[in-house]
Amino acid sequence: MRNVLNHVVIVVLLKEMVTSIPISNEREYPADTDRSIETYASRSDRHGTGLTAQIEELLNDHAYELSIRPDNEGKPMEVTLALMIESITDISEKNMDLTFTLCMHENWVDPRLTFAAEGKNTSIVLPSRLVDKIWVPDLYVVGSKKSFLHSTSVDNLVLRLFSNGEIWYSFKITTTVTCQMNLYNFPLDTEKCYLTFQSLGYNTEEMTLQWNIRNHKTGLFMDARLVESMPKFRLVHHKFSTKNRTIDDESTRVLGVRSQLQVSFELERYLISVFFQSYFPAMIMVVLAGLGMWIDPKSVPARVAMGML
């Protein structure tokens, strides 16, 4: 009986000790710490900058509509394009195409993305997580058979945003483009191939395209030696042009006038290359076949050896 009473006393004492300990569900903060939600929301991300926070807040508040093009006071918005071609390869007479590796630099103004500059920082390169949330022109290469975006060692695209809403969007692609060749004068032929850019969904009343001429007066190619040393063709000259293309296809409901940017390339075939690849081997075969006519018909081993050649 005494042991039972002792156990009861111990249990009562433990219960009083537990209930006497103060328990709080609130986290203790330093006295100088402001725990308001507004304060924490307004602070910059430790992994970013204040400029990034401004753009991210704009996109998260749904104040920016991705599917709507920038407004230009009722006028068609203007997109300028600059090119830097690295190489022209795989010119194929069989497939009637050629391959370009190039960097495209698009420029336009989006007033919805203006922000307050911090000191000398009037522009910012947006991280990849924000690039997909911003409207970009829907340009494509007309007559392209296949294209891909380079990704060594990351995706080769960058978007730089300025405080006044101006945007520079650059990326590197490789594209194989159709080129209808006229081989009537082969091997003394000169071919003309085109690299054309056009908007997929916007007509000239909504968007116009212009060349950024300042970047093309000095040169179109990143390294002219890569173009001058093509194995079968020599680049005679290139020409920039801007034109409008009328699309009238009621079956697909695609109507209107599209703005186009085009670069034409005049390629002259190397005669010496064709001579050593095609004509010279054929001439050797004809000469070897004719030598057999001068061998004595009774000299069977010699004629067999000549025939094997």
Image: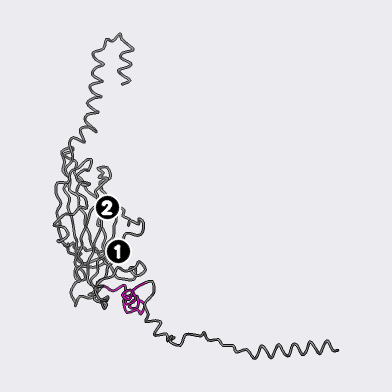
Q: Above or below — where is 128 with respect to 265?
A: below
Of callouts 2 and 1, the N-terminal one: 2
Of all residues, the one furthest to the right in this rendering is: 1
Residue closer to the observer: 237 or 241: 237
Q: Nearer the viewer, mark 2 or mark 1?
A: 1
- x%, y% of residue 284? 24, 24
Residue closer to the observer: 106 or 292: 106
Q: Amino acid at mark 1?
A: Val
Mark 2 lies on a secondary structure that is strand
Q: Amino acid at mark 2?
A: Thr
In magenta, the rendered stretch is 48-69
The answer to whether residue 203 is left or right of residue 131 is left
Q: Residue at x 17, y 62 (%)?
A: 212
Residue corresponding to mark 1 = 158
Residue corresponding to mark 2 = 101
Q: Which quadrant would residue 108 be assigned to in this image?
A: bottom left
Residue closer to the observer: 134 or 120: 120
Quarter of the image containing the N terminus? bottom right
